[in-house]
Image (cartoon, grey):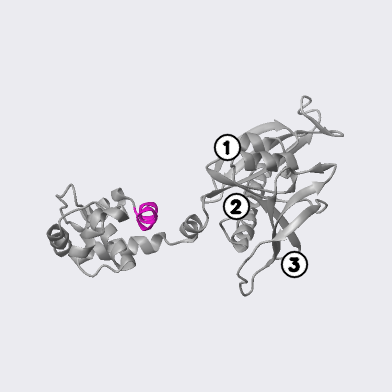
């Protein structure tokens, strides 16, 4: 786990650039400065007391195995300035983006749409409402960097719900509003192991709720954390889903449904709150278009 986190924070290429900047010549191939850094990160976690004990337990931890004398020699010859510069680089990377990457099991993909309308005479092939015509942009936005991953253009009358299936990506957690919360779609996402956090409509019935055990946290906005089936006997989800209820910053009760079971209710609420990034994205783009 530590080595995978380190890999996501500092790549071997970045470490090599720091080594080159300091002026240290790393001639080793089997035990480089990056390997030394991995050992240094793992040693305090595993409480290794010496170079010899470190190399004895290296293999089970996924580290390259070397003789303890090579480890001690490398540790002695690498300048302190290299470690200092790597530490500064690591601190600079400990920003909100990095914290979110380590906290959430997958990256968030925010899905929503925006409609641009004009007079009916300008786009006669795209009727919308009354004398207005319009086109709709369905956007999948990466929460990590605020960049669109995919954009699909449709007529303004196209419903948002089905487009979530087009924009879905199994490598991401989909975060969406109420327009995408059709019960059949939720069952399908769960069957396909497509992670999601979707706001429920206020009138969706919660059938046979079962409270999940959770550690109460001070100042938490979470109201309730349960599993249940969704809907009425006439239209009900086949599977049980997790539902988290919390207060938003304006004091309104929000209900979201998710397939994620190994994260806290507070994290689920934080994921949905990240959806505001796509609203800001649309506001900025609409301002540019209208300007």
Most foreground residue, 17 or 231: 231
Q: Along the polypeptide, which appears first: circle 3 or circle 1?
A: 1
Q: Give the number of callouts.
A: 3
Q: Rate crowding at label 1 as few (under 14), some (14 to 19) or many (20 or more) other CA atoms within 10 Å.
A: some
Q: Residue at x 63, y 40 (%)?
A: 191
The quadrant in which the C terminus is found is top right
Disc 3 versus disc 1: nearer the observer: 3
The residue wearing badge 3 is: 251
- Looking at marks 1 and 2 on the same chain, the residue that comes earlier in the sequence is marked by 1
Q: Residue furthest top?
A: 125
**Mark 2 packing: few (<14 Cα in 10 Å), some, or many (20+)?**
many
Q: Which residue is mark 2?
A: 260
Disc 3 on helix, strand or loop? loop
Q: Quadrant of residue 208?
A: bottom right
Label drawn at residue 150:
1
Stretch of the chain drawn in magenta: 1-10
Neighbour tally class for label 3: few under 14, some 14-19, many 20 plus, Cα within 10 Å:
few
Residue 71 bears which disc, if any? Answer: none
Whether tag 1 and tag 2 are in contact, CB under 8 A, the answer is no
């Amino acid at each position: 786990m530590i080595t995978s986190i380190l890999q996501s924070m500092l790549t071997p290429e970045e470490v090599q650039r720091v080594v080159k900047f300091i002026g240290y010549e790393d001639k080793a191939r089997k035990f480089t400065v990056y390997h030394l850094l991995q050992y240094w990160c793992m040693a305090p976690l595993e409480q290794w007391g010496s170079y010899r004990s470190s190399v004895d337990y290296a293999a089970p931890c996924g580290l390259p195995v070397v003789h303890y004398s090579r480890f001690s020699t490398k540790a002695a010859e690498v300048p302190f300035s290299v470690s200092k510069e790597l530490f500064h680089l690591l601190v600079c990377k400990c920003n909100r983006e990095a914290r979110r990457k380590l906290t959430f099991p997958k990256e968030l993909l925010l899905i929503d749409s925006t409609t641009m309308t004009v007079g009916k005479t300008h786009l006669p092939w795209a009727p919308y409402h009354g004398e207005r015509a319009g086109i709709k942009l369905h956007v999948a936005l990466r929460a990590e960097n605020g960049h669109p991953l995919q954009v699909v253009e449709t007529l303004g009358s196209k419903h948002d719900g089905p487009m979530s299936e087009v924009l879905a990506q199994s490598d991401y957690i989909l975060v969406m509003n109420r327009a995408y919360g059709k019960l059949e779609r939720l069952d399908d996402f769960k069957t396909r192991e497509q992670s999601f956090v979707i706001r429920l409509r206020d009138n969706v019935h919660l059938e046979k709720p079962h409270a999940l055990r959770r550690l109460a946290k001070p100042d938490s906005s979470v109201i309730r954390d349960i599993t249940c089936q969704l809907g009425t006997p006439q239209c009900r989800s086949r599977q049980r889903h997790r539902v988290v209820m919390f207060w938003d910053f304006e004091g309104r009760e929000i209900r979201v449904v998710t397939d994620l079971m190994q994260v806290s209710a507070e994290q689920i609420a934080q994921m949905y709150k990240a959806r505001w990034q796509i609203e800001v994205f649309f506001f900025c783009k609409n301002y540019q278009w209208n300007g």
